[in-house]
Image (spheres, rainbow, N blue to C red):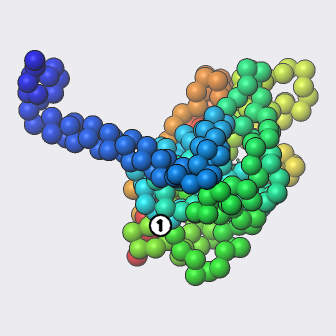
Amino acid sequence: MASSSTIPGKSRSSLPAWLAGLGKRTRLVWQARRARRDVIGGGPNADEIRRMLERAEAFGYFEWPFRLRKDVVGQDVLDVGCGSGLHGLGFIASGARSYTGVDPSVSPDEDRVRQKRKRKDGRIPFESFGWTPQQIEALLPQVRLVCGTDQTLPEETTFDRIVLHQVTEHIMDLDLALARFRRRLRPHGRLLYKHHSYTCWNGHHRKPKTIDEIDPDDPEQRHYLDWAHLDTRPPEEHSMGMNRVRLDEIRAMTERHFRVVTWREKESSERLGGKRLTADILARHPGYSRRELATQSVFCVAEPKA
Ligand SMILES: C[S@@+](CC[C@H](N)C(=O)[O-])C[C@H]1O[C@@H](n2cnc3c(N)ncnc32)[C@H](O)[C@@H]1O
């Protein structure tokens, strides 16, 4: 059997870090499994809770929380712009101590959720999940789903983590909101967000969102297709609900209130129009860099400034 020092590509000096990384990942997966077991528990509702978690996972709501699991284990999490709030089940199953989701669209007794896993026809449908926000809260008292914004919560309520998944592009007073998030974080707190950039191929949030939705016969799409949404200042209704913040602006706003620990920009895939960025399109948008037009999203982790 090969000794650890003979593993190809691993020098004696790099092995401890590699082993430590593997150990950390194994520990996190183990912690997440244990967290899920603890959430299900052994009470009279155990079966129902298990089925509810399985359905939220099947709907695609475990991927984002699982990505953040090392940051949320044992923490009180606030999810601003939580949508349906089903990410909350993923956060709790990933080991978060509690989850509070706020969104103006939360409807306590309505069971209507956007599936995150696309169907074969490419649509992301609204479906019945099986449990309303009220029923989720009754089964899992560590989950709270609030209709409103962060400002709806009492000022003195604080959290260890504030997370936003594809919401920063919608908040109109983003700079003020970031200042409020900083005040709501406890010492050693962290802000974590995934930002969908307005300047990427589908940053308009309208059709076509993917290249298979391109329809040359749809006159509406001409306003958006292939970065047309950036050509002129569009009529208000074309970017309703979008703050159109640019990459360097959101970074500067974040840095006004936080110390950025991680800033990861991801380019658009082919399906999301990445390959449609031509020299011609770049030439038509002299006010934008290639990076701005090509970047689909940003993953940011930040700590409050003292
Ligand atoms: C693209 S959806 C993302 C929903 C959810 N985070 C997810 O990934 O499933 C954007 C959400 O942000 C919410 N939103 C917009 N402005 C907001 C604000 N100022 N405060 C809280 N939520 C807001 C909208 O209601 C919407 O549900």
Quarter the N terminus occupies: top left
Residue 11 at what x, y percent from top left?
Answer: 11, 29
Q: Quick one: 9 or 284, which is closer to the camera?
A: 9
* Residue displayed at 44% across by 67% down: 189
Instruction: Please tell me how crowded label 1 is: few (under 14), some (14-19), or many (20+) other residues with Cα within 10 Å.
Output: some
Q: Identify the residue shown where x is 70% and y is 29%.
A: 118
Query: Could one spot residue 299 in this view of the protein?
Result: no
On the rendered structure, is 235 left or right of 270?
Answer: right
Q: Nearer the viewer, residue 129 or 64?
A: 129
Q: Residue furthest front?
A: 44
Q: Quadrant of residue 296?
A: top right
Residue type beneath disc 1? Asp
User: What residue sits 67% from the left and 31% below the top?
Assistant: 117
Q: Is residue 111 visible?
A: yes
Left or right of 119 in this view: 247? left
Q: Is mark 1 within 8 Å of ligand 1?
A: no
Image quarter for residue 285? top right
Q: State the image coordinates of residue 131 (x, y, percent, origin top left).
A: 74, 49
Q: In the rendering, at what x and y percent does residue 206 appear?
A: 79, 38
Residue hosting label 1: 160
